[in-house]
Image: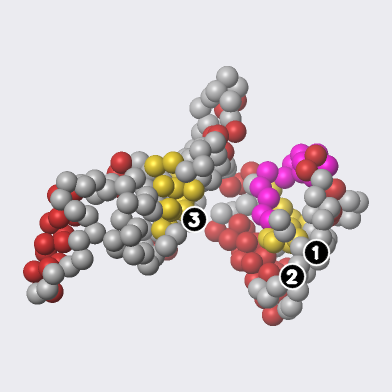
Amino acid sequence: LVLLHAGHALRPLSASLHRPRSAVAATRRANSARAGMATMAILEAGESISPWQVVPVDHITDWCEDEDEIFAELPTYMNPLAGTVMTEINDKYFVEKDEVVIKSVVVNADRDKAAPPTCYMHAGPRKQIYYRPSEVKAAIVTCGGICPGINTVVRELVFCLKEQYNAAEVYGVPGGYRGFAEAEEYRLLNPSDVDQIHRLGGTILGTSRGGHDTDAIVDKLEAKGINQVYIIGGD
C-alpha cells in the first residue's frame, strides 16, 4: 500500500530521494578520477536536480473520510512475514514507502537532463499492513482472454495468502466478472486444491468477456463478507 493521492496526475516524491548538488558533483569527480577520462556532464554547475515524478496509486487512506470516526485513525498491523527466515536473511525484503521504479532506464544524458524522471511505485510487501490477516476473506477472479501462466498466478496467490499471510479464506470466482454476481457458488481454494494447476493450460476458474456491473459485484462481495479481491486480466 502506498501513500499517494489519485487526484494528482504526477506528484514529486519526498525530499529523501533528492540528491544534493554537491553529492552529484563529488560522485562525478570520483568517477572521472577512477576511469582516467572525462565523464559526460549531466548537470552543469549551479543546476538543481529535477523533482522525481511518481505516477499515483490510490492508497486505502485516500478513501477514508476524516470525519468518519471508524477511519479517523486507521490502524496498522505488523506483517506476519516479519521475523521469518526470509526477512531475517534479506534485510531489504520489505518495500519502503518512498521506493520507486524508474520508467526509462536508458535516457539521453544531454537532452533529457531537464525532464523530471517518471517513476512508478515499487510493488511488494510492506512491513506495516492495514488489515488483520486472520480476518481476510479473499476472492480471485480471471477475466478476459486467457494467456499462458494464469493458473500459476492463481496458485501463487493461494499459497501466499494461506501459507505466508495466514488468510482465513480464499475463494475463486467462476467465469470472470459475471461470476461475482451470478448464482454459481464461489470455489473455496486451499493450497492442496491448486498445487498442480500450473501444469494446466487456460484458467481453472473459467473466464468471460464483459459482465462488469460494479454495483452488483460490490453488493455480492459485501453479502459474502469478501474484503480482498485479486483481479487477473480484464480491463
* Label drawn at residue 207: 1
* Label drawn at residue 179: none
Left or right relative to 85: residue 181: right
Left or right relative to 148: residue 129: left
Query: How many residues crowd mark 2 within 10 Å: few (<14), some (14–19), many (20+)?
Result: some
Observer-nearest of 4 and 136: 4
Dots 1 and 2: beta carbons under 8 Å? yes
SS label for mark 3 = loop
SS label for mark 1 = loop
Quadrant the C terminus occupies: bottom right
User: What amino acid is found at the position of numbered circle 3 in the picture?
Assistant: Ala
**Which residue extends farthest right?**
183
Label 2 belongs to which residue? Answer: 146
Please tell me which of labels 3 and 2 falls first in the chain. 3
Label 3 belongs to which residue? Answer: 123
Q: Is residue 223 magenta?
A: yes
- The part of the image, by quadrant, that contains residue 37 is bottom left
> Residue at left 68%, top 69%?
150
